[in-house]
Image (tube, rainbow, N blue to C red):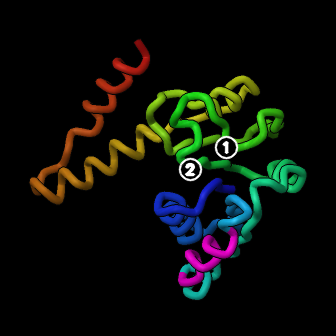
Amino acid sequence: MILGAGGAAKAIVTQAVLDGAKKVSIYVRPQSLDKAKNSFKTLMDQTDGHLEFHALSDVDYFQEELGQADLLVNATSVGMDGKSLPIAKDTIFPKGLLIADIIYQPFETPFLALARQQGLEAVNGLGMLLHQAAGAFKLWTGKDMPTDAIWQELEKIYNS
């Protein structure tokens, strides 16, 4: 399951489909449903991926579908303010669900905090940022970026 249908969401969904995900549910604002469907049309036409589109406002269906999900990714900007949640604050996550937020600042968004309060593993977008930077570094310099060393430094900064 993924929240949002922008560029980052599209990349994540595409990779999930290419990696064999049986179904990906994409949740967006009600007014964005048609745009989201059109955005993923080529992917749906060229792969066997099964994509479903739903309005984030359909809270009951969202909660029901969470019970069968393995992963929930927030690929929206909601939460960058450190206060907002992309989902209802009374959402109950099933045990074992992995939560990811592509936001890396703040280090812990309200979305990640909600997941951790319920005892779930939750990861932010810092790793995605690092590996995007590594790709750009390689393109510009022709050299591999020392991602392991940089990750260790980032952990020191964020865990202090």
Query: Is residue 40 part of the magenta span, yes or no?
Result: yes
Quarter of the picture containing the C terminus is: top left
Q: Which residues are magenta?
A: 33-42
Horizontally, is 56 left or right of 59 in the view? Answer: left
Callout 1: 10 Å neighbours few (<14), some, many (20+)?
A: some
Element assignment for label 2: loop
Q: Which residue is mark 2?
A: 76
Q: Splitting the image into 4 quarters, where does residue 78 fall? A: top right
* Labels 2 and 1 touching (C-beta < 8 A): yes
Q: Outermost residue, left direction?
A: 141
Identify which residue, 75 or 99, lies in the foreground. 75
Q: Which residue is mark 1?
A: 86
Above/below status of 70 relative to 16: above
Horizontally, is 122 left or right of 33 in the view? Answer: left
Q: Residue at x 44, y 32 (%)?
A: 105
Q: Earlier in the sequence, mark 2 or mark 1?
A: 2
Residue 72 in sight here: yes
Above/below status of 101 relative to 6: above
Element assignment for label 1: loop
